[in-house]
């Protein structure tokens, strides 16, 4: 089968691989979204031979379209019972083998996709599940979303549907316009909570918080940030993180997919992976999805 495989320098290239063996259902990949964490792993941060991709819509052996679950907690340990399932010792074990940027994969768990949801939108299930789980840590009220890339736009839509007053900030006008079109207002004044979806927005997010406010760190910070602990101390701010999703959040996300407003998406075949990567890095595409 064909797959996008990382070479010795950590760069992606189309290659032929044997069909994956082992546990889990053998599914046919229909589409896989490019995530910022995939891009973070290029250039030697992941081992040679790695196949990335975890935002996957596929077809199972029964011919049903499904979203693949990325990682599974045990559901029984102390961390899982406390609501921190993504820190479970079992959670890092791979559940999509070899990865979603391939023609076929072994899947440990799946969630059926609604008939009215196309394959590209089906890939939104996993990132949307991450957002919905993160919402559990954001108090209701006036919320600022900092960074209106794909994840930020999902936050805007989810928060608006929850009933929050949502504000948005992004230096790229076309992204901010999308957020405003989804029901957000432009950043103005202080807020109860801020969602950090952009590495460069940390200082602005902290500055916007009311005393006692909450900063949710969602973006993967590639560099160690300089955090203003004096501001956190004096204004009694709470800084919380939320990483990845759970099977329950995946089911909730799939149920919400038909209600989402469309997100501009560029869909390309796997053999144009480099082109899609360039569009992502240049901020010329809000979302890039690849099909085998």
Image (tube, rainbow, N blue to C red):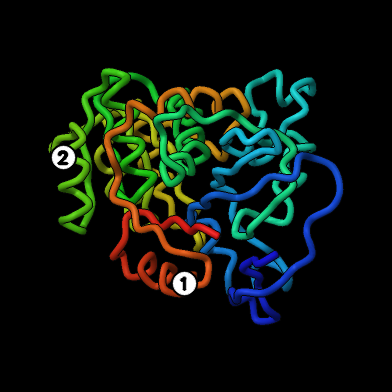
Specify whether 53 is left or right of 36.
Answer: right
What is the distance, in whole Å, between disc 1 and disc 2 at their CAs? Answer: 32 Å
Label 2: element kind: helix
Q: Residue at x 65, y 72 (%)?
A: 6
The residue drawn where x is 41% and y is 25% is: 256
Measuring 24% from the left and 39% from the top, which residue is drawn there? 208
Residue 231 shows in the view = yes
Q: Residues within 10 Å of mark 1 (few under 14, many from 20)?
A: some
The mark found on residue 252 in the picture is none
Q: Position of residue 159 (x, y in %)?
A: 31, 27
**Residue located 36% across and 35% down the image:** 234
Question: Measured from the top left, where is residue 95 in percent x and y?
Answer: 73, 43
Residue behind mark 1: 272
Name which quarter of the figure residue 124 lies in.
top left
**Quarter of the figure that contains the C terminus:** bottom right
The single residue placed furthest to the front in the displayed view is 63
Q: Which residue corresponds to mark 2? A: 180
Q: Give the farthest residue toward the right.
A: 22
Give 132 or 108, whichever is nearer the viewer: 108
The answer to whether residue 185 is left or right of residue 231 is left
Residue 210, above or below 199: above
């Amino acid at each position: 089968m064909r797959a996008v495989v990382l070479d010795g320098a950590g760069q992606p290239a189309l290659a032929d691989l044997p069909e994956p063996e082992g546990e889990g259902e053998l599914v046919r990949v229909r589409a896989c979204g490019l995530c910022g964490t995939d891009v973070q792993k290029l250039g030697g941060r992941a081992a040679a031979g790695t196949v990335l991709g975890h935002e996957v819509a596929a077809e199972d052996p029964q011919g049903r379209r499904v979203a693949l679950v990325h990682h599974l907690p045990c559901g029984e340990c102390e961390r899982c019972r406390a609501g921190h399932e993504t820190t479970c010792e079992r959670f890092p074990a791979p559940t999509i083998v070899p990865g979603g940027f391939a023609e076929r994969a072994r899947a440990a768990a799946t969630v059926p996709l609604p008939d009215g949801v196309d394959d590209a939108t089906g890939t939104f299930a996993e990132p949307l599940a991450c957002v919905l789980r993160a919402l559990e840590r954001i108090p209701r009220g006036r919320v600022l979303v900092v960074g209106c890339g794909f994840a930020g736009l999902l936050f805007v839509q989810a928060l608006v549907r929850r009933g929050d007053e949502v504000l948005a900030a992004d230096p790229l006008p076309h992204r901010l316009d999308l957020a405003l079109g989804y029901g957000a207002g432009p950043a103005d004044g202080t807020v109860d909570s801020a969602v950090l979806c952009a590495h460069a927005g940390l200082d602005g997010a902290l500055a916007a918080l009311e005393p006692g406010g909450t900063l949710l760190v969602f973006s993967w910070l590639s560099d160690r940030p300089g955090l203003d602990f004096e501001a956190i101390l004096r204004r009694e701010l709470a800084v919380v993180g939320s990483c990845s999703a759970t099977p329950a959040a995946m089911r909730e996300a799939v149920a919400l997919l038909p209600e989402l407003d469309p997100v501009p998406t560029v869909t390309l075949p796997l053999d144009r992976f480099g082109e899609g990567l360039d569009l992502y890095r240049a901020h010329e595409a809000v979302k890039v999805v690849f099909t085998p």
